[in-house]
Image (cartoon, grey):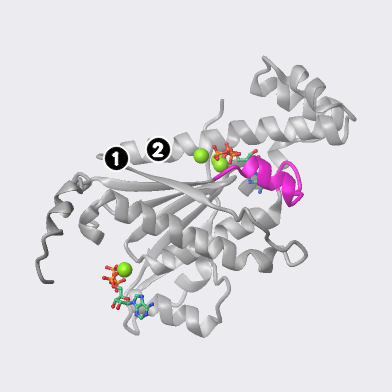
Amino acid sequence: MANSKYEYVRLFEQPDTLLANTWIVVRIDGRGFSKLTTKYKFVKPNDRNALDLMNAAAVAVMKELPDLVLAYGNSDEYSFVFHKDCALFERRASKLTTTITSTFTSYYVFLWTQYFPDKPLTAPLPSFDGRAVCYPSDFNLRDYMSWRQVDCHINNLYNTTFWTLVQQGGMGAREAEQKLSGTYSADKNEILFREFGINYNNEPACFKKGTVLYRDFYPTSADKPEASATETQVIQPASSAAETNETYNRHSRRAVKKSIPSLPQK
Ligand code: ATP
Ligand code: ATP
Ligand code: MG
Ligand code: MG
Ligand code: MG
Ligand code: MG
């Protein structure tokens, strides 16, 4: 590009290259979803369609960005993990974060009607914020995932108990809040079981633990093991099987979904 007298303003741009050889996690979170869930009358505490929509948008992001290896989501948030040796956008934080956030938002809005055919979107439209953080060791990355999963667990146990008190116990929001104030996990489990006959352990795993997406690597050649396609559930949202296979083969990778198997007990 030709130099102009204006060219110097580029020097005001700050470098934001993320530390080499570290896991990069980009976490997105819905903006003002407490309001949005009321506006569109999400089923409380867990609207299955809303979670499925989050998962579908996340799968679409993973397909568009082959450098992503793993993602974890719950509620209105999703964490996307780039491999330690990722070189995409020279590891520039703003490029990585804004690309993930806008791609996710685009798909969330685009796919909305599939999951909420009777609830057309109106302004203000859903939007998400995003941030990028580096984790130097595998141990740190695992603890990051545990941190988000424990958050999911604590929130879900609280929300499940709160909404059971309101919906089945006929309590007002304030009254339910007061009853739960200062309680431990064991107390909430007890309220659910003794007063409502609900065994929290039997709640769906994706409500209690969230959802993991990971990329499964396999050789593109004919020696691909037959079994691998059926071992895990392959997500194919909003695209034909042929189109999906084409995408997978091009990247020699598959996006698959599974619930996290274990959760630390509080
Ligand atoms: P912020 O913009 O600061 O993130 P927020 O209102 O989005 O504000 P969060 O802490 O992100 O605050 O909380 C998200 C809210 O959306 C919670 O109240 C959560 O219960 C609700 N929510 C998210 N997903 C669902 C769902 N699938 N079903 C029901 N409620 C949901
Ligand atoms: P990157 O992801 O690095 O931004 P890019 O392909 O988007 O890659 P840009 O430098 O942003 O690269 O260039 C945008 C391209 O889109 C240019 O080729 C420009 O001519 C084209 N373009 C943008 N808007 C229009 C438009 N309204 N009509 C025709 N062409 C357009
Ligand atoms: Mg937020
Ligand atoms: Mg939010
Ligand atoms: Mg949130
Ligand atoms: Mg461009």
> Compared to 227, does 175 lie above or below?
above
Mark 2 residue element: helix
Residue in the image at 51% along x and 58% along y:
105
Mark 1 CB near ligand 3 (8 Å cut):
no
Q: Position of residue 194 (x, y in %)?
A: 83, 25
Q: Is residue 40 magenta?
A: yes
**Marked residue nearer the N-terminal end (2 or 1):** 1
Ligand 5 found in image quarter = top right
Q: Is residue 202 visible in the rendered structure shown here? A: yes
Quadrant of the image occupied by residue 108:
bottom right
Quadrant of the image occupied by residue 198:
top right
Range shown magenta: 31-46
> Compared to 200, does 66 lie above or below?
below
Nearer-the-camera pick, 95 or 219: 95
Asked if the residues shown at circle 2 and circle 1 are in contact, with their CB atoms under 8 angstroms apart, the answer is yes
- Viewed as shown, does residue 237 lie left or right of 46? left
- Viewed as shown, does residue 93 lie left or right of 260? left
Q: Label 1 is placed on what type of residue?
A: Tyr
Nearer-the-camera pick, 68 or 208: 68
> Few, some or many C-alpha atoms within 10 Å of disc 1 (few <14, some 14-19, many ≥20)?
some
Nearer-the-camera pick, 8 or 223: 8
Q: Position of residue 35 (x, y in %)?
A: 67, 42
Q: Position of residue 24 (x, y in %)?
A: 31, 48
Q: Label 2 is placed on what type of residue?
A: Tyr
Nearer-the-camera pick, 110 or 247: 110
User: Which residue is label 1 attached to?
Assistant: 135
Residue in the image at 71% along x and 50% along y:
47
Residue in the image at 39% along x and 35% along y:
143
Query: Which mark identifies residue 144?
Result: 2
Q: Position of residue 161 (x, y in %)?
A: 75, 31
